[in-house]
Image (cartoon, helix red, strand yellow):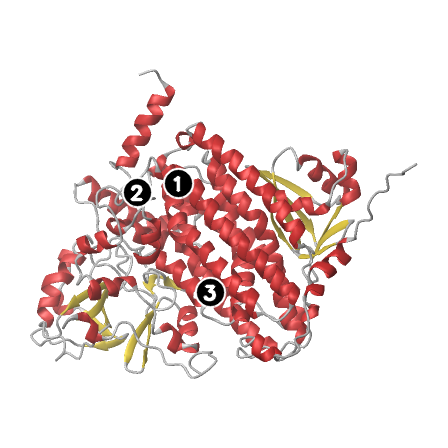
Amino acid sequence: MSTVFIALQANEETRPIIDAIELDNPRAVVHRQPAMVKIDAPDELVIRKQTIEEQLGRAFDLQELQINLITLSGNVDEDDETLTLRWNS
Amino acid sequence: MDMKVEKKKLNLKDKYKLLTRDLGWEPSYRSKDEIYPYVKYEGLKVHDWDKWEDPFRLTMDAYWKYQAEKERKFYAIIDAHTQNNGHLNITDARYLTALKIFLQAISPGEYAAHKGFARAGREFAGVGTQVACQMQAIDELRHAQTQIHAMSNYNRYYNGFHAFADARDRIWYTSVARSFFDDSMSAGPFEFMIAIGFSFEYVLTNLLFVPFMSGAAYNGDMATVTFGFSAQSDEARHMTLGLECIKFMLEQDPDNLPIVQAWIDKWFWRGFRVLGLVSTMMDYMLPKRVMSWREAWEIYGVENGGALFRDLARYGIRPPKGWDDAEKAIDHMSHQLMLGLYQWSFGTAFHSWIPSDEDMDWLSAKYPATFDKHYRPRWNHIKKLAAAGTPYKNFGLAKLCQCCQLPIVFTEPDDPTMLCNRETTYKGEKYHFCSDGCQDVFEHEPEKYIQAWLPMPALFQDQQGDIGAWMDWVSLKDGTDNGDYAGSEDQRNFQQWRGLATSNQ
Amino acid sequence: MPVTAIREYVGVPRDPAANFHGKQLVYVSWDRHLLFAAPFLICLPPETPFRELVEGPLKALMSPDPDAAAVDWSRVEWLKSNQPWTPDFDASLAANGIGHKDQLRLRTPGPNSLSPAA
């Protein structure tokens, strides 16, 4: 098992995004640190546009994540609907 | 009646295709070798440049939109910080030492990376690569500018910030970071990508930025949190580019594996040495500490680096050659380097200090196997010398490593009581190294490293050993910028201004 | 190839002896005495007698160590370029075969107050 992670700035914009990530990834562990939130998950983490939009109550372009992204780990694949982080091991 | 029809939007993959790869063309009257003269000499074989794709599929139009938003957020906070005397909200002016090192050594590295990516974007033959490098070149320039801008507010009140550009070019400890970037920029475009895109951005940048920015948040430095996170939001893209780049090289041709592995070995070790400065910051320089260097290494080195190299094992890549030596150094390096920074603090454009008993107890808890045994006795002796009115200054200067340019402060991997002495003779000249890792780098390309400008020998060539003349040359104000924090002007001013801000006296 | 380059490439060393105004560099360190963070860099003319190197800069630089005064210089073991070696205190650096940028190490059998007990 390898851990993938994503870290986002802790602010009002990311609060619903983090909630959405937790909903979509039951195995994810959320660490709240000063000014940032780091989310770890075993092997894979999936971020879905639809879930974020439900939490946010407005349309959301996944590329908006770029603004509040701090760091991530794992192979990235992004299309219109999902952003996936994955280790192949 | 007109119906308002929503404009049909291209999906991400089609948009990426149209706005990157389709911008390229086949040359008709010049050969590709003439247009891209530097893509072959490193020995890398590339058969299909179109296999290089940015997994974020970021196109220039979206790039400008999101970067503009990041800038707006950044300047809103910088303005607030300036207007509200944000410099008085930090825990303690000792914290500024970390910022001074950052400004003198790391921000110029951002600028160097900007130049390197602008060049790599021109030299690579594939459009996806060119666009990604162009974005990263602009990012790196933005990082240098926002960092300098954010820290200029501290320069209005505190010493040691005023001549960062001279420090970058001339002072001794900055040459560690500078030589790292100069080495990468004077390599070919593929090696540059491994050096900066993969080794620095992917393997090591988390160890630099994440603890640094959390450290800033812990220590009440809003300006740094802001430039840090603003820059870091780009780093996720850079890391991804670095990882994609290495996979691309390995997938293009099996002959690329040994070349790529050798670069990983080299650049992991070079990056690890640069992080020596970061280890001192985490363990010694933050008045309120986030986590120890050891703890950060566990998360971002062992766990994350481990995951990465397990993933790359499918291509035949193994962990970097210096990995085990790095692990052995983790519990020693910050202490060894900090003892050096303290005893040479007459030559640093930042303050250092003897750790308090409370600091030493923290270090002992974080480094139970090493601190009390090896390092507390040395600090206690230094404390005794200071109490006797003879504070320890080591005017013996130091032997520097020909490769990483750090003073040779590190011990043998398996014997923390013996300095690591490595040397070789090349064309009749003697060269010294701090480690097997640095000696290996030299032996592989000696003609490159014999040219290294080593600041301490240079002091005897150019200023004939006159430290006062050297201080003038590096724009270091003796008695103001350097030396112990205790009794410094920074300490006096911070205490006085904070007093004014919290009382009516 | 001693450097990866598009054509033959020869570097110019930065620190040859000729650049040091008639002097040379000598690096000296005291084994297992790590109050001193790194080997000392000492710059002096090759004609300097070895005794002067020891009595002058070296003793001064070593003095902050609590064991410095107790060193019995007649019993010091020396290494040059990591090999055992015996200096002639009355001969010059050059006559002792100490070249530019050579590293000398000394080992003392006496106490080591700041080092953990073996």
Can marks 2 and 3 be said to lie on one chain?
yes
Residue A35: which disc? none
Q: In the current view of this chain or complex, which residue is farthest to the right?
A: B1
Q: Which residue is mark 1?
A: B152
- Amino acid type of the residue tagged 1 in the rendering: Ser
Q: Residue at x 45, y 59 (%)?
A: B112
Determine the chain carrying the residue at label 1.
Answer: B
Q: Secondary structure at mark 2?
A: loop
Image position of C47 (left or right of B103): left
- Residue B456: percent from the left, percent from the top? 26, 62
Q: Which residue is mark 3?
A: B269
Q: Residues within 10 Å of mark 1 (few under 14, many from 20)?
A: some
Q: Which residue is mark 2?
A: B353
- Residue B176: percent from the left, percent from the top? 38, 60
Determine the chain carrying the residue at label 3.
Answer: B
Can you say whether B441 is above or below B115 in the image?
below
- Amino acid type of the residue tagged 3 in the rendering: Trp
